[in-house]
Image (cartoon, rainbow, N blue to C red):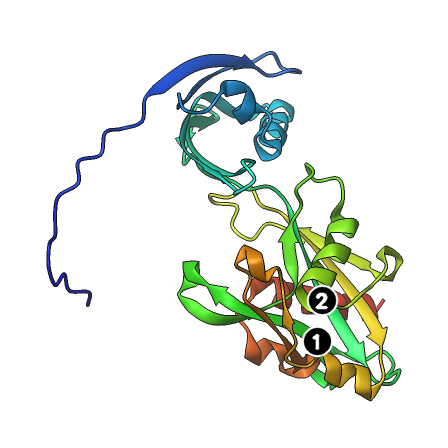
Amino acid sequence: MIRIIKKVSTLLRLPPRMESATVVLEKSLRPISIEYPTKYSLEKIRQFPPLRAWLQSLDQQADIGVSKLSIQSVDEFKSGKIGFIKLSTDAHVNNTRVPGIVFLRGPSVAVLLILRTQVSGRVASHLDTDYCIMVEQPRVAVADPALRELPAGMIDDGGCAGVSTAVREILEETGISIEGGDLVELSSVYPSPGACDESVGLYACEKVVTAEELERVRDRLGGLRGGGELITVRLVRVCDVWKETRDMKALAALYLWDQQQTK
């Protein structure tokens, strides 16, 4: 139970001033009324790649009708670029209103990177005693100061460079260099489609290293420390990954990797 020790003051927050406009979907020519905070220009909001992609998806889907959307919050990165948008919609399917809260953040990637000290052959993950690279970092949203996950990151170019983003994130978060040709595409999954547009492109990569190279990776500090990424690289036996993390990306990638090994 959470107790309030002392009530300091009551803050009166006025709702943000809103403006309205209408956009017309390019293919279906369906109009959608948009309410948005006046502190942001409509053009800047419309150029946010995840919003553009979401509207294009609606344009292709005649069964989902959206007549109005209200942008409730806009979060910007330090660079000034929009990072996230939360909005509510009046959405209907077959004349029945459906939940329409949407958190737009766009696509991302995650990489199952397995380091082998020798070629161990094709084995199922629950028998594989070589190592999976995991990154340990604070995750405020789940109140975990040291969550172990697969190396991952957002695609920031509108969704056209999953492989290059995967290569970049592996280098930034772990210090390990891989080539795009080393990656095997596993699938693309929706972690939380009830409210979020994010799709995660899952990749796998096997890399044979020496015992000395393996030890140089163990417990290495990674990430963009100046950007608040407090990452420590962890070596986890592949067969132990399911016990060491609750990261959906890792568990899904392991399963899909096993399926590819049996083909």
**145 or 114, which lies in front?**
145
* Left or right relative to 87: residue 155: right
Query: Image quadrant of residue 134?
Result: bottom right
Measured along the vertical axis of the image, is residue 138 above or below residue 227? below
Q: How dense is the environment of label 1, judged by Cα within 10 Å: few (below 14), some, or many (20 and up)?
A: many
- Which amino acid is tagged 2? Leu
Query: What's the mark number on residue 232?
Result: none
Residue 244 picture location, percent across and down: 56, 78
Kindly identify the residue that appears in the image at 51 percent across and 44 percent down: 196
Asked if one can make out residue 130 in the rendered structure from this viewpoint, the answer is no
* Left or right relative to 131: residue 96: left
Query: What's the mark number on residue 112?
Result: 2
- For label 1, the residue is 132
**240 or 105, which lies in front?**
105
Measured along the vertical axis of the image, is residue 81 above or below residue 143? above
Q: Quadrant of the C terminus?
A: bottom right
**68 or 174, which lies in front?**
174
Query: Image quadrant of residue 47?
Result: top right
Kindly identify the residue that appears in the image at 50 percent across and 19 percent down: 42
- Which amino acid is tagged 1? Cys
Residue 69 picture location, percent across and down: 43, 24
Disc 1 secondary structure class? strand
**Residue reaching furthest to the front:** 226
Residue 72 picture location, percent across and down: 38, 32
Measured along the vertical axis of the image, is residue 129 above or below residue 107? below
Kindly identify the residue that appears in the image at 17 percent across and 40 percent down: 11
Q: Are marks 1 and 2 in contact (CB under 8 Å)?
A: yes
Q: How dense is the environment of label 2, judged by Cα within 10 Å: few (below 14), some, or many (20 and up)?
A: many
How many callouts does the rendering have? 2
* Left or right relative to 77: residue 27: right
Residue 130 picture location, percent across and down: 76, 83
Query: Image quadrant of residue 184?
Result: bottom right
